[in-house]
Image (cartoon, grey):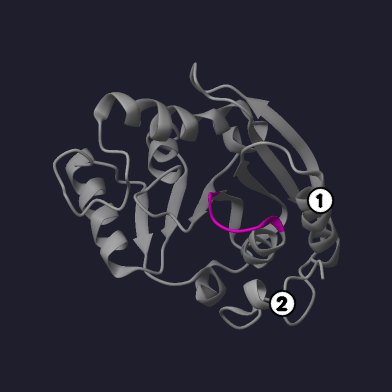
Amino acid sequence: MLAGDGHAPTNVRDPRLAVDVHLADSLAALELDVMAKAGRVADLGAGAGFPGLPLAVALPAAEFALVESQARRCSFMAGLCTVAGIANARAIGTRAEEWREGIGTNDVVLARALAPPPVVVEYAAPLLRVGGALVEWRGRRDASAERSGQAAARRLGMELAEVRRVSPYGEALDHHLHVYVKSRQTPPGFPRRPGIARKRPLSR
């Protein structure tokens, strides 16, 4: 569908390149113990379905929610699930801050190329159960960005547990998975209204 659908929400449509950029990069998360144990997983800003859909195929016993605010992208993912026969994933057409049924229900939240670390942590924290984990895809390490992410995490009952360097394909340079674990309940007042996390990041 990526190659044949001109409206596919990705710039990477060449099947050979997509195997690396989309599939291998998504499946790098299988290196993490938190993925093997997950029963409920949410992919925030799922876009064209990566990393959520490849991981749903790899982990058929887990349930995947592909959270995406743009209707066109949700429609594309729903069609992809039908064509590929992926029964354990569903597209959720809403913003992360407005997905009330997901609050406190997820073992793992995924975020790939979504937003700065403090924003991603704030999106994820309310959606995780205590003991659950955020897995965030990042490129080259940035000490300042990591400090801001950790500052936001502390305010939200989260802590950075690991930064795992991964090499999902030969040309992959500086690919890292940042894993935050939720150690206590999210404080009252979260999630904040849509858009506030970006306008007023908690690290400031």
Foreground label between 2 and 1? 1
Q: Secondary structure at mark 1?
A: helix
Which three-letter amino acid code belongs to the residue tagged 1? Answer: Ser
- Measuring 32% from the left and 39% from the top, which residue is drawn there? 12
Residue behind mark 1: 144
The segment highlighted magenta reads 112-117
- Measuring 54% from the left and 29% from the top, which residue is drawn there? 28
Chief secondary structure of the magenta portion: loop
- Measuring 54% from the left and 67% from the top, which residue is drawn there? 102
- Measuring 81% from the left and 50% from the top, which residue is drawn there? 144
For the N terminus, the quadrant is top left
Q: Secondary structure at mark 2?
A: loop
Residue 114 among those drawn in magenta: yes
Q: Could you say which disc has been placed on residue 200 in the image? A: 2
Question: Residue extending furthest left?
Answer: 4
- Mark 2 Cα shell of 10 Å, populated few (<14), some (14-19), many (≥20): few
If you read the primary sequence from the N terminus, does the residue marked by circle 2 or circle 1 appear first? 1
- Between the C-alphas of marks 2 and 1, the distance is 17 Å
- Mark 1 Cα shell of 10 Å, populated few (<14), some (14-19), many (≥20): few
Q: Tell whether 39 sits left or right of 124.
A: left
Residue 92: image x %, image y %? 39, 65
Query: In this picture, is 184 found above or below 195?
Result: above
Q: Is residue 108 visible?
A: yes
Residue 19: image x %, image y %? 35, 27
Residues 55 and 129: in front is: 55
Which three-letter amino acid code belongs to the residue tagged 2? Answer: Arg
Question: Residue extending furthest top?
Answer: 170
Q: Tell whether 25 sits left or right of 178.
A: left
* Label 2 close to label 1 by CB (< 8 Å): no
Q: Tell whether 155 sits left or right of 10.
A: right
Residues 81 and 147: in front is: 147
